[in-house]
Amino acid sequence: MAVNRTPFIAGNWKMNLDHLQAIALVQKLAFALAEAKHDPADAEVAVFPPFTDLRSVQTLVDADRLPIAYGGQDVSSHDSGAYTGEISGAFLAKLGARYVIIGHSERRTLHAESDELVNAKVLAAQKHGIVPVLCVGETAEDLEAHGASAVPVAQLRRALEGVDPAKEIVVAYEPVWAIGSGQAATPEQAQQVGAALRAVLAEVLGPDVAASTRILYGGSVKSSNIASFLREPDVDGALVGGASLDVDEFSAIVRFKKHVGA
Ligand code: PGA
């Protein structure tokens, strides 16, 4: 983790928590962070609730000026029109969403999202002033056949086509085999792929953008392993699934510096 990149801890709630449960969790999280005197310079915190929760989260965050960012778990590649069930980046921006997850492996596999669609979504998010949290990662079969870096590197290269280097992007390396499995990658693996992804960022968007872009690791992150990932120079935060639904565990992850003395 380099000094000029604020660590980013993002909670991907997936399809969990209705809007009332979302309010309760964000309130508890804000309380836990305040009690721990969490310094936002130590880690930026963001939550990614289901779409139906976003208005409630916005109201709460705005009313209490909470140091918690939020975003959507997906975005349409279109601005508006006859796309039943889709959510426009314009709508997310209106709700104060600063970020949006794009290309999560669950969308790539369960909804057959192609690299081309992921690229279109990245461009759409940035068009509306939303920072994409672009997910890339290899399956267990990819890992066996090509090693860890080849697939994430190819996915990133494809997703960056036509991207304006002046617009912020966050990249999340999430090995598919590590998501929800309880079997995280090793910090060394995350570093190896993180460095390869940063090299692609440098090549496509330039060395300055590469140096300032945050690369997260995701896949079975917990309070007991977060500090080991954040010690790596090319891991700047985490995309947390299951553990983000437990306030104590998630706030312990956010406070990785204090509780492990990293
Ligand atoms: P997990 O999920 O932390 O439950 O493994 C990570 C993710 O899917 O973003």
Image: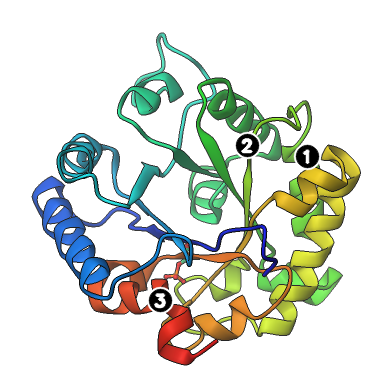
Q: How far is mark 1 from mark 3, CA to CA? A: 31 Å
Does residue 12 appear anywhere in the picture?
yes
Q: Which mark is residue 118?
A: 2
Residue at (50% x, 47% y) in the render: 107
Amino acid type, callout 3:
Ile
Image quarter for residue 16?
Answer: bottom left
Quadrant of the image containing the N terminus: bottom right
Q: Is residue 239 above or below residue 207?
A: below
Q: What's the residue type where badge 2 is placed?
A: Val
Q: Amino acid at mark 1?
A: Arg
Mark 1 crowdedness (10 Å alpha carbons): few <14, some 14-19, many ≥20 = some
Which SS class for mark 1? helix
For disc 3, the marked residue is: 253
Q: Quadrant of residue 206?
A: top right
* Disc 3 packing (10 Å; few <14; some 14–19; many ≥20): many
Residue 148 visible in rendering: no
Q: Quadrant of the C terminus?
A: bottom right
